[in-house]
Image (cartoon, grey):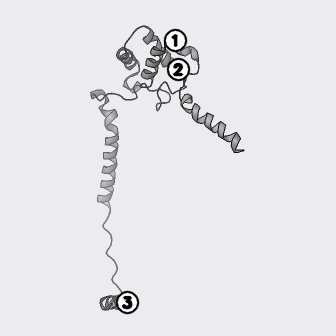
């Protein structure tokens, strides 16, 4: 049984990096390997607007496929990466970038995690400030005082 599992496992491990590439139709790929590598590198910087956590190169969503084709058309026209990204940002906004730039338009996007932490700390602070102080402990009764005295005496003597 182990002999049958090992080759299958090895094949899965070797093909795992290939499965991450979402291009399903070979006709999507550019014939020039250098231009295709450039398109893939550019596509890995662009967010799939459907999946939102994947690049368009890793996504199999229809919109990602359309944007991949659009990127490849612009590359074939001889446009630079900056021109292609500028076109896509003008069309879809900075959200299309997996790593949007820090500028006045994206301060809220980059600052929102800090704002969320500050708001959470504020809520916790207000709740703690409004909490009544703990009640003082009840005084010891006579049996507890005797037991405490005995424990202290034993500890001091030992």
Residue 108: give x, y in percent of width and height: 31, 33
Q: Residue at x 36, y 14 (%)?
A: 83
Q: Residue furthest top?
A: 77
Q: Residue at x 52, y 20 (%)?
A: 65
The residue carrying pointer 1 sits among few (fewer than 14), some (14 to 19) or many (20 or more) residues within 10 Å by Cα, namely: few
Residue 151: give x, y in percent of width and height: 35, 88
* SS at badge 1: loop
Q: Residue at x 51, y 13 (%)?
A: 30
The residues tagged by marks 1 and 3 sit, at their Cα atoms, a distance apart of 90 Å
**Residue 106 as seen in the image, left or right of residue 76:** left
The residue carrying pointer 2 sits among few (fewer than 14), some (14 to 19) or many (20 or more) residues within 10 Å by Cα, namely: many
Which numbered circle lies on residue 31? 1
**Residue 152 as seen in the image, left or right of residue 37:** left
**Residue 134 as seen in the image, left or right of residue 12:** left
Residue that badge 3 annotates: 147
Quadrant assignment, res 62: top right
Residue 130 sits above or below residue 16 on the image? below
Residue that badge 2 annotates: 65
């Amino acid at each position: 049984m182990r002999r049958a599992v090992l080759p299958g496992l090895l094949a899965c491990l070797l093909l795992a990096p290939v499965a991450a590439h979402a291009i399903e139709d070979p006709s999507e790929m550019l014939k020039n390997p250098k231009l295709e590598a450039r398109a893939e590198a550019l596509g890995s910087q662009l967010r799939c607007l459907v999946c939102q956590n994947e690049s368009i190169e890793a996504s199999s969503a229809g919109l990602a496929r359309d944007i991949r084709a659009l990127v490849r058309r612009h590359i074939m026209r001889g446009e630079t990466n900056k021109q292609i990204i500028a076109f896509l940002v003008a069309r879809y906004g900075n959200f299309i970038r997996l790593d949007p730039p820090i500028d006045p338009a994206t301060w809220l996007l980059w600052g929102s995690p800090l704002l969320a932490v500050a708001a959470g700390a504020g809520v916790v602070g207000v709740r703690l400030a409004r909490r009544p102080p703990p009640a003082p402990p009840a005084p010891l009764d006579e049996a507890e005082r005797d037991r405490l005295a005995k424990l202290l005496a034993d500890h001091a003597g030992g």
